[in-house]
Amino acid sequence: MGNRELKKTDPEISRLVEKETKRQAETLDLIPSENYPSKAVKEALASAFVSKYSEGRPHKRYYGGMENVDVLEPFVEQRVRQAFRLSAKKWAVNVQPYSGSPANYAILRGLLSLGDTIMGLALPHGGHLTHGASASLSGKDFKAVQYAVGKDGFLDYEAIKKLASQAKPKLIICGYTAYPRKIDFKKFREISDSVGAYLLADISHIAGLIVGRTTTHKTLRGPRGAFIVCREDLREKIFPKVFPGLQGGPHNHTIAAIGVALKEAMAPAFKNYARQVVKNAKTLAAELKKYNFSLVSGGTDTHLLLIDLTNKNITGKEAQILLEKSGIVCNRNTVPYDPRSAFDPSGIRLGTPAVTSRGMKEPEMEKIAAFINTVIANPALALKTNEEVKNLCRKFPLP
């Protein structure tokens, strides 16, 4: 098999790799932030670049042996511009951040002073920890003012504008981890401009949908990594906070893999994939509503949906554990105005990027909705449903 040397060198780790591969092959991954990278992406991730250290920026390094790294990094930066249709004169790109969280923090520290006011969507309403949550450094190092969705589950732009005019934030964050509807980035730009604030769009979840030009690692099907795109005039404020501010040498193998994922994302087939991700999410949402599941905002425009399980008399944690017994992997999640704790909230979050990468379409979403309903309605059928899930997975092997 592909891990022959690993099996010989470290059989314990090899067994865990084999078990994890088997687990993924036999389960339905409905976690919106997870996806399956291609074989080409994984080959780049395991390439010779994994062993090269390269502190600094291209052609301004602190080590020798940089002739290939100094070609790779600017090349992938340009791939980012191509994928998102950005001008090289106006937009600076940094592909060095290890992940989205340090990328967000580097932006905050680059543009703001400690104690400045920021505005982000509250964590229980679909925001991210790094958007000003009290447990995060973004909420400790800055004065975080949190906005919320309305009782209908939608962003209330007038309420956000009013809050911004009162709080006078230096930076506003949009782009979320558990908001299933389209984001009006133009309105956020207008709100930010009205109070003289920077606008940070965290598109980590929907990057693939944007590149795929749909209605709106995750959807991009790349490695675990991140990149920052900012106006050229902000380069010298933000980039030094990535290095040397927060991290040392970049992970060049990850940068290479990001480059491969971006090339794949610019191919015509990826546009079809991105559209199918949204179609699948809409179908899954519609089918679950038929079974009387309560969807936050009533549905979805993107790759994810958020379900309030209160009317099903089961908590998010209980549902996550129960569904996993049936081979359906999702994550517990707070819902807006949730009376329960984040550790055992009222909801679960579902997404379609990974199952779409396996080739599943609308008919399979109907089956998955039926599986979910069966297990939630009758927990005793979890193991029986698990066999049906495995049969479905066999028809759609991992890519």
Image: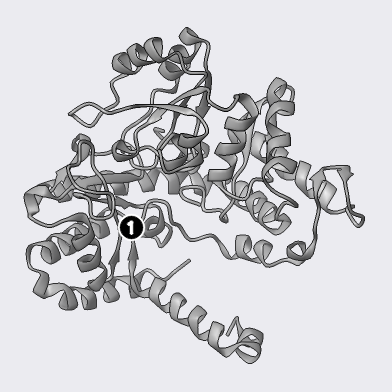
Q: How many circles with numbers are drawn on the protein? A: 1
Q: Position of residue 333 (x, y in %)?
A: 28, 49
Residue sitting at x 70%, y 55%: 251
- Camera-nearest residue between 19 and 243: 243
Q: Secondary structure at mark 1?
A: loop
Is residue 90 in sight in this rendering?
no
Colouring mode (rainbow / by chain / secondary structure / one colour): one colour
Q: Is residue 32 above or below residue 60?
A: below
Counting from the top left corner in percent of width and height, residue 318 is at: 19, 62
Q: Position of residue 132 (x, y in %)?
A: 44, 34
Q: Is residue 195 left or right of residue 146?
A: right
Horizontal arrangement in the rendering, residue 292 relative to residue 136 (left or right) = left
Q: Residue at x 55, y 82 (%)?
A: 13
User: To which residue does mark 1 refer?
Assistant: 30
- Amino acid under disc 1: Leu
| Residue 78 in sight here | yes
**Image quarter (top left, top right, bottom left or bottom right) of the N terminus:** bottom right
Residue 354: percent from the left, percent from the top? 40, 58
The answer to whether 65 is drawn above or below residue 108 in the figure is below
Residue at position x 40%, y 71% in the image: 24
In the rendered structure, the answer to whether residue 36 lies left or right of residue 256 reads left
Q: Which quadrant would residue 50 be assigned to in this image?
A: bottom right
Q: Which quarter of the figure has residue 370?
A: bottom left
Classify 167 as above or below 206: above
Horizontal placement of 236 versus 382: left or right? right
Density class for disc 1 (Cα within 10 Å; few <14, some 14-19, many ≥20) is: many
